[in-house]
Image (cartoon, grey):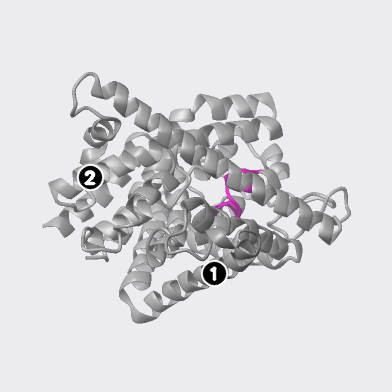
Amino acid sequence: MYLAINIIGLIVFLAIGWLFSKDRKAINWRAVLTMTALNLVMAWFLTSFPIGRTIVKGAAAGFDALVQVSYQGIAFAIPSMVKVKSMDFFVSVLLPILMIVPLFDILTYIGVLPWIIKWIGRGLSFITRQPKFESFFAVEMMFLGNTEALAVSSLQLKRMSAKRDLTLAMMSMSCVTASIIGAYTQMMPGQYILTAIPVNVINALVVTSMLNPVQVSQEEDFIAKIGGSASVADGTIEADGKKEPFFSFLGDSILSAGRLVLIIAANVIAFVALAALGDKLLGLIHPWVSLEHLLGIIMFPFAWLMGLNPSDAFQFAQYMGEKLVTNEFVVMGKVTGKIATTAFSEHYRAVLTVFVTSFANFSTVGMIIGCFKSIVDREKNDLVSKNVPYLLLSGILVSLLSAATVGLFAW
C-alpha cells in the first residue's frame, strides 16, 4: 500500500508543477516525461543494482577518506579536540571544509572540474533536449554551489532573457556544493547523499521546465564566452585575460573556506537558538504547541505521500518544515545519532536523506536575489525578486520529487 502511495505522491508533485505553471500550454511534456523516466532509471540503478550501490558507496567512501585526511591537519592545530571519543559538530563536520574547499578550487584552477562539468552538461543537454546553458548550469550548481555558479555565469546571465534568468534563479534553490558533501556524509547515509545529487540535477530541470517554460530558439541556445571572462562551461578560469598566480589563488580559497565554516556555524547556532525561542513563546499558548508541531501539520500531506505510515509521516513533516525554515545542517544534526539505527526504516532513511540534501530554504532566497542584484540589470533583478514564491516552490518541489523518486526503490 505504501509503495502505491509513494507512486501517487510522485504524480501529485508533478501535477503541482503543472498547476502552478506560468504557461501550461508551453510545457514540453516530452522533455518532462523523458527526464522523469531518466531519473527513475538512475535512482533504480544506484539503489537496487550491486554495481550502482558499489558506485555510490565508493563515492561516499572517497569523501569520507577526504574528511579523515583533513583530521590530520585539524589534529596538528588542536589535537585535544580530534582524538576524542565523540567530536563536536564544529570539529567533525565543519573544520574539514577548510581542506576540501581548496581541493575543489584547485581542481577548478587546473581545469579538471570545468572539463567534467562541460562534458556532463553536454551529455545532459543531448539526452534531455534542454537548452545548452540550462543543462550546464544544472551541473555547475551541484559542484560549485548557487552563488558561485551564478557568479561564474555572470556573462551568460547578462546576455540571456529575463525569463531564462528566472529559470536559473529557480534552479539555484536546489543546489549543493561538492566541497561540503564530505560534511553531509559524516551526518547522513552517504549512499543516499550521493544518489540525491544527480537526481536533484535532473529534477531541477524538470521543475523549472514546468513552472517557467521558456521557448529557446536555436540562435539563443548559446554558451556566452569572451576572452578573459570566467566561464566554467568552456573550461577557463581567468580574470582580465590573465590567470591569477596559483598561491595567491590558493590563499584566497583557504580564506573563503574559513568564511564558509563561520557562516555555516553562525547560521546553525542562530537558527537553532531562534527555533528554541519560538518554541518557548509558542509554549505559552499551550504546552503542545511548538514550531515543529505546526510545521508538521502544514507539511504532513506531502510527507504522507512519500509512502510513510502516519506516525513517521508526521515526524518527517516536522523535519521537512524545519529544514525549509532553517537549513539542512540543523536537521542533519538532530538525526545523525539515530538515523543508522532501527529507529528509522530503510525507506524513511532514504527519503529523509534525499529531501534534506539541498540548499532549499528561506535564507537561500536572499542569497540568490543578492547575487542577481550584483550581476544583472534592474529589470532582470526585479523579475527575480517578484517571483520569490516561485523560487521557494521550485526548491520544495525538487526536494519532494527527488525524495519520492529514490524512495520508490528503498524499502
Q: Residue at x 52, y 68 (%)?
A: 63
> Can residue 210 be spotted in the picture?
no
Q: Residue at x 63, y 48 (%)?
A: 149
- Could you tell me which quadrant the N terminus lies in? bottom left
Residue type highlighted by circle 2: Gln
Question: x%, y% of residue 18?
Answer: 34, 40
Q: Is residue 348 left or right of residue 227?
A: left
Q: Which mark is residue 182?
A: none
Q: Which mark is residue 315?
A: 2
The span picked out in magenta is 136-150
Give the farthest residue toward the bottom: 51
Q: Residues within 10 Å of mark 2 (few under 14, many from 20)?
A: some
Compared with residue 45, is residue 253 higher up or lower down, i.e. above or below? above
Question: x%, y% of residue 377?
Answer: 70, 28
Name the dominant secondary structure of the magenta segment.
Answer: helix
Q: Is residue 175 left or right of residue 52?
A: right
Residue under label 1: 68
Residue type highlighted by circle 1: Gln
> Can residue 14 be spotted in the picture?
yes
Magenta stretch containing residue 217, yes or no?
no
Indicate the secondary structure of the residue bearing disc 1. helix
Compared with residue 54, is residue 235 higher up or lower down, i.e. above or below? above
Of the numbered discs 2 and 1, the one sitting upstream in the chain is 1
Magenta stretch containing residue 147, yes or no?
yes
Q: Please state which of residues 245 and 399 is positioned toward the viewer in this rendering.
A: 245
Question: x%, y% of residue 140?
Answer: 60, 55
Q: Is residue 81 left or right of residue 101?
A: left
Q: Residue at x 54, y 69 (%)?
A: 68
Q: Residue 78 occupies which quadrant of the picture?
A: bottom right
Indicate the secondary structure of the residue bearing disc 2. helix
